[in-house]
């Protein structure tokens, strides 16, 4: 498989309900040592409910300026979530299906303070 | 002392290197038709290119990454590929115009037909790209290009009605003979001539070529902030020359001989000789920059090895790209197309493509992963957003205006 | 609605598109090699179409024909992929650094071809600019 098969692929829930598109794939370098670095393990998929286009990382990183551009791109990607790879039931070419009982996580890169106040606002 | 010389050299080459065939032609045409009523656009354009070039220079110096690597990394292959296609073609168009400009200037000097000069110019261009050191190339063309100061001298020698010129520049109105659409079309052309994207590709790649680091930031900022405005003054001087000589007579500039005529009227044969030397240097310098930019953009997009600091064999695909582009530009010119017409189109298309290069640079200049503590400050970002609006507006308005005005005719 | 934060995994976290794809790859001497056009993924059992039931790893950076398919869509036959094994990757920052020389890699064949057939044969092509 190549990552191009996953990126931009539509994501469906267990009941075939459309959830959005894969905007990015989260990797963690905690696999077995492969050369100098650990092998990158597929940790999860970042799913945006609105758009398949990547938006320059604004939706996940701490960059907040220039404010106007940052705000617009964040708004375009509101509702983005992370699902773990273990919650992926099937990967057909150009389609991803999640298993029963999959969980959504915050898309923030861990280890950094939350960059998504729009998602963490108390409701 | 040596430091001071270095600073002076940097600023002088920035002034001499600012003008290219696009600035020469567009300013003269605009001067002959609109007087100085579009001089404000040069001011807007110069501030814009100062902002844009200093941002891309800072990104290159801090992160070591040139503009098109960043465009690819930020926009992804599809949007960046579309951007590459547009930028590469416009750059090729500009290269063609510059080589045509060299041939026309040499024709003025020698009365030998431009088509005989085109192969000579193209070969000389390749030879410099192939063999000369980057800094030598920059300094020589920049310093010789300074002779275009003669346009500013000519304005004084022509003894114009200063209050009339000041009036045109300070309270701009659309001349009675011209429509509003044409006025705005030429405003965009002037803006595109001042802010051509190739300058940014070249400037940021040049920073990598010359191995700038954070320590060189002050010098590079000075070069841009002092050099480019003086270049802008020369642009306005070209327009003023045309405004003084051609506007009252109702003659529209359409050839290089008309562009230099005011200088010849003011200063005689000697001044004419000087201005021709200046135009050859400016167009040759810009032809070098556009040739290199064609290699830079493609190589950076594809991740190839590039740079004049390497032996050609160690940047083989980069050099092959430039050879092909120079050959194509020469071949197009041999069909006897008018380089002045090509120039007029190239500056407008530059304005159209500008947002594609501007936005990624603005984003990366704000990204601490690349820039660390050297991210844009608040003031820079405020100004940069104003320019984002201007650039997008000019880009969107350009094609409808081009169609509505029949490309300004 | 607020989403629970993900656990903090022990290793370096990279988002593929954000941190790896389309980045410049440099060899051990800092010479540009290619860009990361795509990544190849294998399941822990070597399967080349893993799903969530097994752990999957990135095994290679890809360059070349896969670029065209990321632009225009489709999928090139795997015989046309040019791989750089993850083993060769030494560091990931704003560029991807390799621990080997670019010349030894399969992905640079076009560069070598142009050098050997065209540029290297022109006079002065193998000398420093001066």
Image (cartoon, grey):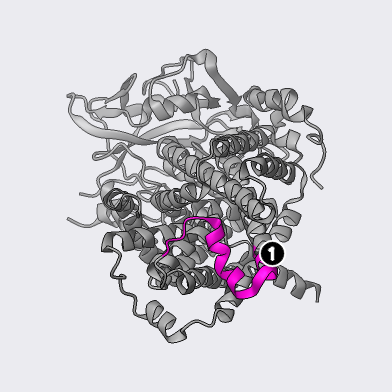
Left or right side of B49 for C121: right
Q: Nearer the viewer, residue A32 or C116?
A: C116
Identify the residue at image location x=35%, y=49%.
Answer: A59
Q: Quadrant of residue B12?
A: bottom right
Left or right of B271: which side holds B376? Answer: left
* SS category of the residue bearing label 1: helix
Q: What quarter of the picture does the N terminus of chain A occupy? A: top left
In this rendering, would A25 be left or right of B264?
left
What is the total number of numbered labels drawn onto the structure image? 1
For image coordinates 20% across by 49% down, the residue present is C1
The question of residue B164 being in magenta is answered with no
Examine the rendering and report whether any part of residue B49 can be seen. Answer: yes
Label 1 Cα crowd, 10 Å radius (few <14 / some 14-19 / many 20+): some
At x 39%, y 63%, the residue is: B387
Q: Does the image show residue B72?
A: no
Coordinates of residue B206 in the picture (x, y in percent): 64, 53
Q: Position of residue B25 (x, y in %)?
A: 50, 58
What's the magenta region? Answer: B251-275
Q: Is residue B106 above or below residue B218?
A: above
Image x and y of residue A62, in percent: 41, 56
Q: In the rendered structure, the residue with mark 1 lies on which chain? A: B
User: Which residue position holds label 1?
Assistant: B273
A36 relative position to B346: left or right:
right
- What type of secondary structure mainly makes up the magenta span? helix
Q: Quadrant of the image for the C terminus of chain A?
A: bottom left
Q: Nearer the viewer, residue B260 or B130?
A: B260
Name the spot of residue B395 as percent of width and height, x first.
35, 53
Viewer-side residue, B348 vs C19:
B348
Q: Residue furthest bottom?
A: B163
């Amino acid at each position: 498989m190549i990552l191009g098969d996953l990126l931009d692929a539509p994501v469906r829930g267990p009941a075939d309900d459309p959830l959005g598109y894969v905007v990015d794939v989260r990797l963690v370098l905690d696999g077995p040592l492969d050369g100098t670095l650990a092998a990158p393990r597929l940790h999860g998929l970042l799913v945006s409910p609105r758009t398949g286009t990547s938006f320059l990382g604004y939706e996940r990183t701490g960059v907040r300026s220039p404010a106007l551009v940052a705000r617009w791109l964040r708004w375009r990607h509101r509702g983005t979530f992370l699902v773990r790879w273990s919650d992926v039931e099937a990967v057909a070419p150009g389609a991803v299906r999640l298993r029963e009982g999959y969980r959504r996580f915050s898309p923030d890169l861990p280890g950094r303070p939350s960059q998504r106040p729009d998602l963490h606002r108390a409701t | 002392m040596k430091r001071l010389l270095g600073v002076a050299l940097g600023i002088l080459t920035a002034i001499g290197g600012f003008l290219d065939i696009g600035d020469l032609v567009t300013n003269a045409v605009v001067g002959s038709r609109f007087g100085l009523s579009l001089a404000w656009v040069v001011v807007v354009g110069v501030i814009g290119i100062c902002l844009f070039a200093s941002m891309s220079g800072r990104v290159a110096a801090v992160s070591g990454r040139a503009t098109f690597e960043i465009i690819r990394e930020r926009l992804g292959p599809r949007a960046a590929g579309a951007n590459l296609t547009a930028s590469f073609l416009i750059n090729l168009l500009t290269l063609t115009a510059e080589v045509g400009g060299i041939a026309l200037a040499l024709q003025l000097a020698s009365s030998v037909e431009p088509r005989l000069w085109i192969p000579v110019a193209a070969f000389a261009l390749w030879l410099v790209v192939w063999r000369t050191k980057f800094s030598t190339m920059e300094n020589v063309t920049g310093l010789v290009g300074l002779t275009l100061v003669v346009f500013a001298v000519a304005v004084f020698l022509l003894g114009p009605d200063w209050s009339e010129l000041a009036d045109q520049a300070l309270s701009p109105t659309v001349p009675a003979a011209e429509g509003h659409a044409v006025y705005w079309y030429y405003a965009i052309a002037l803006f595109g001539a001042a802010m051509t994207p190739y300058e940014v590709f070249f400037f940021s790649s040049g920073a990598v070529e010359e191995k700038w680091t954070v320590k060189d930031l002050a010098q590079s900022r000075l070069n841009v902030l002092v050099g480019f405005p003086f270049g802008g003054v020369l642009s306005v001087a070209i327009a003023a020359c045309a405004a003084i000589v051609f506007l009252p007579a109702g003659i529209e500039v359409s050839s290089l001989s008309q562009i230099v005529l005011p200088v010849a009227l003011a200063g005689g044969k000697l001044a004419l000789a000087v201005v021709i030397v200046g135009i050859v240097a400016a167009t040759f310098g810009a032809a070098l920059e556009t040739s290199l930019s064609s290699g830079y953009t493609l190589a950076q997009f594809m991740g190839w090895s590039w740079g004049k600091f390497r032996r050609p064999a160690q940047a083989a695909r980069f050099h092959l790209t430039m050879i092909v582009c120079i050959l194509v530009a020469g071949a197009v010119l041999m069909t006897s197309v008018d380089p002045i017409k090509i120039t007029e189109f190239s500056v407008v298309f530059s304005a159209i493509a500008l947002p594609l290069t501007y936005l990624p640079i603005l984003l990366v200049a704000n990204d601490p992963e690349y820039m660390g503590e050297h991210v844009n400050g608040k003031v820079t970002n405020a100004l940069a957003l104003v320019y984002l609006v201007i650039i997008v507006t000019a880009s969107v308005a350009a094609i409808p205006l081009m169609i509505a005005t029949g490309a300004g005719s | 609605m607020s989403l629970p934060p993900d656990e903090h995994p022990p290793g370096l976290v990279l988002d593929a598109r954000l941190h790896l794809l389309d980045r410049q790859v440099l060899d051990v001497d800092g010479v540009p090699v290619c860009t990361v056009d795509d990544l190849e993924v294998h399941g822990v059992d070597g399967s080349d179409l893993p799903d969530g039931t097994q752990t999957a790893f990135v095994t290679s950076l890809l360059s070349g024909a896969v670029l065209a398919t990321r632009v225009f869509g489709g999928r090139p036959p795997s015989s046309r992929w040019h791989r750089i094994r993850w083993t060769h990757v030494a560091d990931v920052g704003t560029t991807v650094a390799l621990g080997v020389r670019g010349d030894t890699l399969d992905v640079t064949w076009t560069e070598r071809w142009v050098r050997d057939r065209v540029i290297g044969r022109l006079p002065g092509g193998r000398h420093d600019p001066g």
